[in-house]
Amino acid sequence: MDQKKIIIENGNIIEKIKNKEGIISENYITKNWYDWIDYWSVDFDYESKPEVIKFKTNDGKIEEEWTGNFVFENEWQSFRDNKNNYIELMSAKREILSDKTKIAVKVVDIFGNDTVKVLEVKL
């Protein structure tokens, strides 16, 4: 029976297989930078939905307060699934109606780590 191990070396995920004769072969699971991406999505108008929390004051009234952040609204996405390992690297086109907006991009890697980057776009 072949022995298999997965390692990460020089930024690549490699499956190492040792056969009965002791010969080790390598199968590169990641070959490109985008092989690390499991899912990514875009919010084309990030500042359109302020994050608001509700709280009860000492006198029992319900008040709302803006946290200073915005809610990420997933307007487009691409993700891998078990049947298809392909991931789209270009989003759908979206008309931007103002001369300045903020676009947020969320990326989730194959380990489940997620990152959001907000970019200001001036047209």
Image (cartoon, helix red, strand yellow):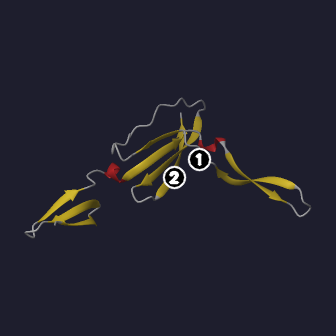
Residue for badge 2: 116
The image shows residue 47, relative to residue 3, as above or below, that is above
Instruction: Give coordinates of residue 114: x percent, y percent.
Output: 48, 56
Q: Residue lying furthest right in this view? A: 59
Q: Residue 19 bears which disc, if any?
A: none
Q: Amino acid at mark 1?
A: Phe
Of residues 50 and 29, the one nearer the viewer is 29
Q: Residue at x 23, y 61 (%)?
A: 15
Instruction: Give coordinates of residue 60: x percent, y percent.
Output: 90, 59
Q: Is residue 117 left or right of residue 33?
A: right
Identify the image quadrant of residue 21. Answer: bottom left
Secondary structure beneath label 1: loop
Verify CB contact (< 8 Å) between mark 1 and mark 2.
Answer: yes
- Mark 2 packing: few (<14 Cα in 10 Å), some, or many (20+)? some
Q: Is residue 64 left or right of residue 75?
A: right
Q: Quadrant of the N terminus?
A: bottom left
Of residues 98 and 88, the one nearer the viewer is 88
The image shows residue 90, relative to residue 58, as above or below, that is above
Secondary structure beneath label 2: strand
Instruction: Give coordinates of residue 88: x percent, y percent.
Output: 38, 39
Q: CA distance from mark 1 to mark 2?
A: 9 Å
Of residues 17 and 31, the one nearer the viewer is 17
- Mark 1 packing: few (<14 Cα in 10 Å), some, or many (20+)? many
Q: Residue at x 40, y 50 (%)?
A: 38
Instruction: Give coordinates of residue 44: x percent, y percent.
Output: 55, 39
Residue for badge 1: 72
